[in-house]
Each structure stands twice: as C-alpha cells, then as structure tokens.
Image (cartoon, grey):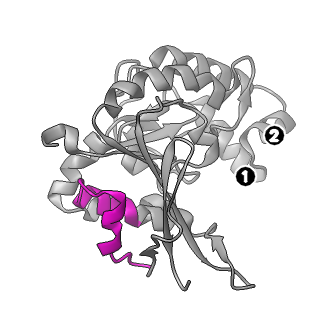
Amino acid sequence: MSGRAALPLILLPPSEAKAVGGTAASWTPGTMALDLDEVRLEVLVALEHAMRRPEAERRALLGVKGSALELATAANRDVRTSPTLPAMERYTGVLYDALDVGTLPAMSRRRLSRCVLVFSGLWGAVSPSDPVPDYKLKMGASLSPVGRLARRWAEPLTAAIEPLTAGRRVWNLLPNEHDGAWRPRCDVEQVTVEFVEPGRDGRPVTVAHWNKLLKGSLVRHLLAEPTTAPEDLAHWEHPEGFRYDARRCRSEHDRMVVVMSRGL
C-alpha cells in the first residue's frame, strides 16, 4: 500500500476542556471538511433553544453547575456568532496536551488533517483544521427534539466517514459514547487500544484516569510512523513505560484490541 491509502485514519474524542475565544471568523455552513451541515444546523437550533430553558434543565443537559454552567451556557448561546479556532487549538484536554500538536515534526503535522477526525456531539466529526467555536455538548446527551446525539449522528456520520476508510487501517480511540455514533462496515480494519496495569490485588485493570494522556502519545507515534500495524507496537517504547502485550491482545467483534501493559 502506498501514498494516501497507506495513511491511517485515527478517530478521537473531543476534550471537555476547550480554549476560549478565537482568532478567526464565526462558523458558517460549508467551512468544515465533512459535509454534515444539515444535521449540524439541526443540532445547533436545538441547542440554542435548550439554552433558554431553566437552570436545572441546562445543568442536566450539560453536566456542569455553578460558574461552569454559566460559562457553558454563554458559549452555547453565542456559538453561531463567536470567533473560531482550528479544532486542534480549541481542544485542550489531556489527550491533546499529550499530542502537543505544536511540537510535532513537520511531516507529522502535514499528516494530521489527512489522518485525524475528532467526533463531536455538536459537529458530528471535525478535521484538525476545521474552524470550531467555543461550545459544550456531550455526544451522550439527549437534546430535545433531536434525541440522543450519538443515535442521531450514526447514519450521517457513517455515510460521511465510509469513503475515508477504504484501504486504510482505522485506529479507533473513541470512548463508548462516541463509538456508538457510527456503524462501520464489517470489513473495515479497526484497531482499538487498551492500557492496563496491576490493580490493588495485582490483577490487570484498564487504566482510567490517565487513559487519554496515554492515547495522546500513541497518536504522536502513529503520525510519525503511519504504516504502523498492531504488532509493530512491540518495537515502540511508550513514554510512560507501557509495552505491547501480545498475550492479552485479542479479536473482539469487529475489531482488533491491542493491549499495552505496564508492570504485568
């Protein structure tokens, strides 16, 4: 495999934490890489209506309270008029801090927009350079009258992403709520990654708190070495000391599960 087809497709969740403000014009239809604007506008209208609801309803929808709720409400009310940042600058959570786009080598930076898609409850999926305003809306939320967002996005997202999967390995680094927002064909080569270490009783447990940080380092590696196959990770030294664990790797439903372990 060579050329563009050799590049992986890496699916990431957004971050809860987001940079505020922006340096570019507000979002308008036609400015994002994937043509999902019909559903984006549907969700935007529903979100704007929801931001006029009583505080208790907004708190339940957004999952925050107090000053965080006030800031999230203000951002969502202004989402169609506020300035934007490229998605890779808007998302500032642990995964994106570990990915640290600003320090990527030049070749990895050039691959970024061809390899990475970020799933979003509001936008469906965005490319790293897509203009994104400040907002807050989880993929797992249920937004009247749209319904549960992961379910609403499943059909249009699947249709938009399907052409991008042809001949490519898909590194699916999505949590469950985002993974439920698309339905890939059974012949799509999907790889997911688990990081495990000893629990209190010595038995292997999946890393929870630092999972995003660990995946950020993996994405850096995949951008630097885009032809990486799961078994090639046996030769990769993860910066946090996790190593490819062939004993625990497995096939599961429609995907290969790669296990990286530490201290086992």
Which residue corresponds to the image point at 47% horizontal and 32% vertical from the top-left? Answer: 186
Per the model, the C-alpha gap separating discs 1 and 2 is 15 Å
Q: Is residue 109 magenta?
A: no
Q: Camera-side residue: 27 or 40?
A: 40
Which residue corresponds to the image point at 19% horizontal and 48% vertical from the top-left? Answer: 110
Which residue occupies the extreme top position in the image? 38
Local packing at callout 2 (Cα closer than 10 Å; few below 14, some 14-19, many 20+) is few
Secondary structure beneath dot 1 equals helix
Vertical placement of residue 194 versus 58, above or below: below
Q: Camera-side residue: 225 or 134?
A: 225
Which residue corresponds to the image point at 57% horizontal and 25% vertical from the top-left? Answer: 153
Q: Position of residue 215 (x, y in %)?
A: 46, 62
Is 179 left or right of 5, judged from the image as shown? right
Q: Camera-side residue: 114 or 50?
A: 114
Q: Quadrant of residue 31?
A: top left
Q: Which residue is mark 1?
A: 67
User: What is the three-letter code of the residue carrying label 2?
Assistant: Ala
The first of marks 1 and 2 along the sequence is 2
Q: Position of residue 17 (x, y in %)?
A: 56, 54
Q: Is residue 100 visible?
A: no
Q: Position of residue 117 (x, y in %)?
A: 40, 40
Q: Position of residue 51 (x, y in %)?
A: 71, 29
Secondary structure beneath dot 2 equals helix
Q: Camera-side residue: 96 or 198?
A: 198
Q: Which residue is mark 2?
A: 60
User: What is the three-letter code of the residue carrying label 1?
Assistant: Ser
Which residue corresponds to the image point at 27% horizontal and 56% vertical from the top-left? Answer: 223
Span shown in magenta: 217-240
